[in-house]
Image (cartoon, grey):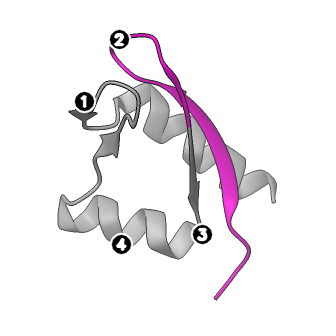
Amino acid sequence: MGNRTVFDIVCPNNHNQSVKFTQDEFEALLKSGALVFHCNTCDTTWPPSTEEIAIFRRRFSEN
């Protein structure tokens, strides 16, 4: 398994969260439709935005 990259995200209620993925994990979750984020502070779940997906892919390509 490759190295995981840490991403800082913000939930819809403005709580900071961190998620970690390898590129393969990220792409597999995205393809399967199972990629959702979860906020441990307010128990909210939400799908990644188009902008977040683009940021993640950019970061993976930089590594």
Three-letter amino acid code at the position of disc 1: Thr
How far is mark 4 from mark 2, CA to CA?
A: 27 Å
Measured as percent of width and height from the top left, residue 60 is found at: 68, 56
Q: Which residue is mark 3?
A: 22
- Badge 4 crowding class, 10 Å Cα cut-off, few under 14, some 14 to 19, many 20 or more, is few
The quadrant the C terminus occupies is bottom right
Measured as percent of width and height from the top left, residue 56 is found at: 57, 45
Q: Judge depth for marks 2 and 3 and give the one in front.
A: 2
Three-letter amino acid code at the position of disc 4: Ala
- Which of disc 3 and disc 4 is earlier in sequence? 3
46 with respect to 6 (left or right): left
Query: Which quadrant of the view contains residue 16?
Result: top right
How far is mark 2 from mark 3, CA to CA?
A: 26 Å
- Contact between marks 2 and 1 (CB within 8 A): the answer is yes
- Badge 1 crowding class, 10 Å Cα cut-off, few under 14, some 14 to 19, many 20 or more, is few
- Which label sits on residue 13? 2
- Badge 2 crowding class, 10 Å Cα cut-off, few under 14, some 14 to 19, many 20 or more, is few
Label 4: element kind: helix
Residue at the image point whose x is 71% and y is 56% from the top:
61
- Which of disc 1 and disc 3 is earlier in sequence? 3
Measured as percent of width and height from the top left, residue 34 is found at: 21, 60
Q: Which residue is mark 4?
A: 28
Three-letter amino acid code at the position of disc 3: Thr
Three-letter amino acid code at the position of disc 2: Asn
User: Count of labels shown?
Assistant: 4
- Which of disc 2 and disc 4 is earlier in sequence? 2
